[in-house]
C-alpha cells in the first residue's frame, strides 16, 4: 500500500511539472518569408554621422528656404540620417564672405553664394553674374555641360578649397527697385544702389548708370530708411518677402542679371564623406535647385509681382523701358573687368550670339 501511494505521488508531481512547462499560448512559426520581411524593414544606424550647416541670407519666408529644407529632408532620407543638413536663414551663421572663408578652412558649413563672390577666387567665373550674360533656365543648364565651366569648378575646389554642389539655384531676373521710375540708364545717374562688394557687381551697376554701394542684404531695409542707399537691384521674390515695398515705391523690370546662385561647401569636408553620400548630396542639391528655380521663375515671381502691386508699388515693364540702351550700357562692365573675351568664348561654346 505504501508503495502504491509513493508511485501515485511521483506521477502527480510529474504531471504538475509538465503542466508548468507547457506554453501559455501558441506562438506563430518563424518562416523564411517573415524573416526576410523583418530584415528588409530593419534600418541599420550609420556607423558615422556627418552634418552640414548651411547658411543663406534670405528670410525663412523666401522660396529658397523651403527648397533648402526639402534638399535636407531628401539627403537625410537617402542616407538614413547618416548625413544631415541644418539650414540657417537670414545669415544666422554670419556674413557670407566670412562663411566662405570658413569653408576654405575645411569647416562643415555651406553657403548660398553667387559667381560674383566666387570670382574673387577664379576671376573668369564672375562672368556668369555679368549683365545680360544668360537669359533663361535652359541657358544655365547649358553652362553646366561646358568644359570651360567645369574647369572653373575644378579650379575652385583644387586651388581655393570651395566645392560647388550645384549652381542650378537660379533666383530670377534682377530689376531696379527705387523711389523713382527708371526708364533708361540716364535715370540712374546719382542713384546710390545697394549691391554686394564683389567687382562684377560693382562694375555692372556702375555700367548701368548708378553708383554702387556695398551693403549686407540684412542691412538694406534700414539702409533705405536712413538714406545710405536710394534703392537696390533685386529679384521679385526677395523684394516681396523682405517687404521692401514699405520703403521703396518703384520696380523697373530691367532684368539686367539672371541671378545664378551656387550652393557651396568645403572641398576638404566633401572629400571626407563616403562616396555614396557625395553622390546623394550633389544629386539632391541639383534636383532641389532646378525644381525651385522653375517655380521661382514662373508662379512665385508672378505671385510676388502681384503682391507688390497690391501693396501699392508701381511696376514698369520692359516695354516701358529702353532695353536696348541698358544692354548697350552693360557692355562696359565686361570691358572694365577684361571679361569680354571670356564671355564671347563661352557664348561660342554655347552656340549663342
Image (cartoon, rainbow, N blue to C red):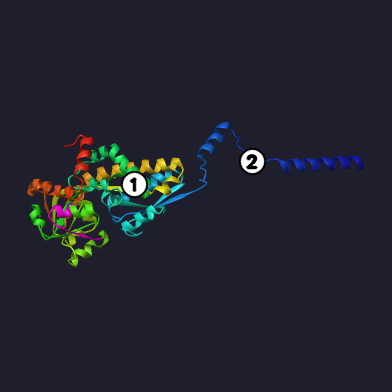
Question: Residue drawn at (12%, 46%), measured in percent from left and top?
Answer: 327
Vertical relation: 30 (above or below) 303: above
Question: In the image, residue 72 lies at what x, y percent?
Answer: 38, 48
Q: Which quarter shows the N terminus?
A: top right
Question: Residue drawn at (43%, 45%), measured in percent from left and top?
Answer: 271
Q: Quadrant of residue 180?
A: bottom left
| Magenta residue span | 204-215
- Number of labelled discs? 2
Q: Which quarter shows the C terminus?
A: top left
Please tell me whether mark 1 or mark 2 is closer to you in this view: 1
Which residue does the numbered mark 2 point to in the structure image? Answer: 25
Q: Is residue 205 magenta?
A: yes
Q: Quadrant of residue 283?
A: top left
Q: Is residue 1 visible?
A: no
Say left or right for 204 vs 146.
left
Question: In the image, residue 134 lies at what x, y percent?
Answer: 20, 42
Say left or right for 105 vs 350.
right
Q: Is residue 191 visible?
A: yes
- The numbered mark at residue 156 is 1
Tell me the distance, in whole angstroms, between the alpha carbons under discs 1 and 2. 67 Å
Name the element at disc 1.
helix
Q: Is residue 43 magenta?
A: no
Question: In the image, residue 219 lies at what x, y percent?
Answer: 25, 63
Label 1–label 2 contact, CB within 8 A:
no
Q: Quadrant of residue 26?
A: top right
Question: In the image, residue 122 lies at what x, y percent?
Answer: 30, 48
Q: Residues within 10 Å of mark 1 (few under 14, many from 20)?
A: many
Q: Residue furthest bottom?
A: 226
Front-lying residue, 141 or 117: 117
Front-lying residue, 11 or 278: 278
Amino acid at each position: 500500500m505504501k508503495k502504491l501511494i509513493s508511485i501515485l505521488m511521483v506521477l502527480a508531481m510529474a504531471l504538475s511539472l509538465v503542466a508548468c512547462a507547457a506554453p501559455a499560448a501558441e506562438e506563430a512559426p518563424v518562416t523564411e518569408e517573415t524573416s526576410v520581411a523583418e530584415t528588409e524593414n530593419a534600418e541599420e544606424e550609420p556607423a558615422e554621422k556627418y552634418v552640414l550647416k548651411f547658411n543663406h541670407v534670405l528670410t525663412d519666408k523666401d522660396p529658397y528656404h523651403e527648397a533648402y529644407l526639402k534638399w535636407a529632408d531628401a539627403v537625410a532620407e537617402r542616407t538614413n540620417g547618416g548625413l544631415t543638413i541644418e539650414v540657417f536663414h537670414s545669415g544666422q551663421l554670419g556674413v557670407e564672405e566670412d562663411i566662405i572663408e570658413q569653408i576654405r578652412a575645411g569647416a562643415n558649413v555651406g553657403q548660398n553664394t553667387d559667381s560674383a563672390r566666387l570670382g574673387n577666387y577664379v576671376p573668369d567665373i564672375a562672368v556668369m553674374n555679368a549683365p545680360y550674360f544668360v537669359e533663361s533656365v535652359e541657358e544655365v543648364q547649358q553652362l553646366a555641360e561646358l568644359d570651360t565651366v567645369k574647369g572653373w569648378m575644378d579650379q575652385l575646389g583644387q586651388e581655393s578649397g570651395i566645392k560647388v554642389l550645384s549652381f542650378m539655384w537660379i533666383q530670377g531676373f534682377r530689376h531696379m527697385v527705387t523711389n523713382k521710375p527708371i526708364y533708361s540708364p540716364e535715370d540712374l545717374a546719382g542713384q546710390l544702389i545697394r549691391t554686394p562688394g564683389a567687382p562684377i557687381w560693382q562694375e555692372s551697376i556702375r555700367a548701368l548708370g548708378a553708383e554702387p554701394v556695398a551693403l549686407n542684404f540684412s542691412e538694406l531695409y534700414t539702409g533705405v530708411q536712413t538714406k545710405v542707399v536710394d534703392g537696390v537691384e533685386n529679384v521679385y521674390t526677395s523684394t516681396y518677402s523682405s517687404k521692401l515695398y514699405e520703403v521703396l515705391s518703384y520696380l523697373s523690370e530691367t532684368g539686367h542679371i539672371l541671378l545664378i546662385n551656387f550652393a557651396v561647401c568645403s572641398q576638404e569636408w566633401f572629400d571626407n564623406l563616403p562616396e555614396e553620400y557625395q553622390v546623394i548630396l550633389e544629386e539632391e542639391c541639383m534636383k532641389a535647385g532646378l525644381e525651385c528655380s522653375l517655380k521661382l521663375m514662373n508662379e512665385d515671381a508672378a505671385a510676388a509681382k502681384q503682391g507688390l502691386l497690391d501693396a501699392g508699388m508701381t511696376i514698369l515693364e520692359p516695354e516701358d523701358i529702353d532695353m536696348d540702351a541698358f544692354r548697350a550700357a552693360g557692355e562696359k562692365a565686361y570691358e572694365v573687368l577684361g571679361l569680354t573675351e571670356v564671355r564671347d568664348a563661352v557664348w561660342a561654346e554655347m552656340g549663342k550670339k
